[in-house]
Amino acid sequence: MRIAIYGREFNEKYDQAIQFIFNILEKKGVELVVFEKFNDFLKEKIKNIPNYATFNHYTQITTEIDFILSIGGDGTLLDTVTFIRDSKVPVIGFNTGRLGFLSTVSMNETETAINALINKEYTLDERNLLRLQTKSNLFGNLNFALNELTIHKKDSASMMTIHAYINGNYLNSYWADGLIVSTPTGSTAYSLSCGGPIIIPGSENFIITPIAPHNLNVRPIVLPANNTITLKFEGRSKKYLVALDSRTETVNSTEELTISEEKFKVNLIRLSGHDFLTTLRNKLMWGLDLRN
């Protein structure tokens, strides 16, 4: 079995837990390929670490990799997706972050999770992504997102106006601090904090959620992902911020954004007891009587 590992720098309190992950994988005879920058960091943090094979480009993630293990929080897993792209290599997140909607495996589940992976005792959750198209080729070939696209004003001077169209038909002009277009996967992220609905993965939807709208009667809207969304800007500022997951670029007010469903999908590994509804209850503490 060949496993790729992607990670970021981590707090020293996770030193032993991360070393435990590598120790188990080595004992199981797994061949490891580690993200180059993460591998360099590990050499400084963990004693006697072997010389692993490394990768630093998405073309090195091929079907010869059985799956990718992401070590970190949800942001780390989103970064991992930029290496997976259309390879269909499954990914699982070991959580050293906080909430962990995507990186669902806690550190105390490490050995159980690795055994399940090796024994192929898991299922795959196929997640759709959104794709951004612009005349200036904003984000280059990283013009996709698993969670969301966010438009936000660049400074605190004034709100912006975003004119939204669906399949060329005028939807609304949002007077707000910004706008979020999210996938079902991203419905539990930024969109949720701005009052957006929770959408069960696999629903094949987009959610348009305004950020601090001037008109309080403007609410989030859900539409099928086979629609094309076009966004145009207006306001005092000449530049705005556009983000795809954790990647941010500055865009001119004359730029138009076209959002559609990405052609490829990403496979998230789901272990027993880690289904979406269970994650909702655990992470959002649904069903708990906080009075007691």
Image: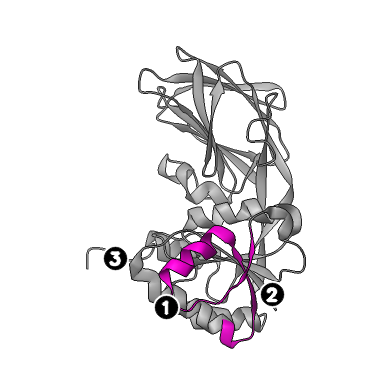
Q: Quadrant of the N terminus?
A: bottom right
Write down the region rendered in magenta. Answer: 26-55
Say what secondary structure mark 2 lies in.
strand
Residue identified by numbered label 3: 289
Q: Position of residue 90 (x, y in %)?
A: 67, 65
Q: Position of residue 17 (x, y in %)?
A: 42, 75
Residue at 44% x, 59% y is: 9
Question: Of the numbered discs in the image, which one, if any, rests on residue 2?
Answer: 2
Is residue 260 depicted above or below 197 in this figure? above
Residue identified by numbered label 1: 108
Is residue 11 depicted above or below 247 in this figure? below
Kindly indicate the quadrant of the structure image that contains residue 288: bottom left
Residue at 55% x, 77% y is: 50
For this rendering, which residue is in front, 279 or 61? 61
Q: Please give left or right for residue 101 compared with residue 267 in the image.
A: left
Residue type at the position of mark 2: Arg
- Residue 107: in magenta span: no
Residue type at the position of mark 3: Asp
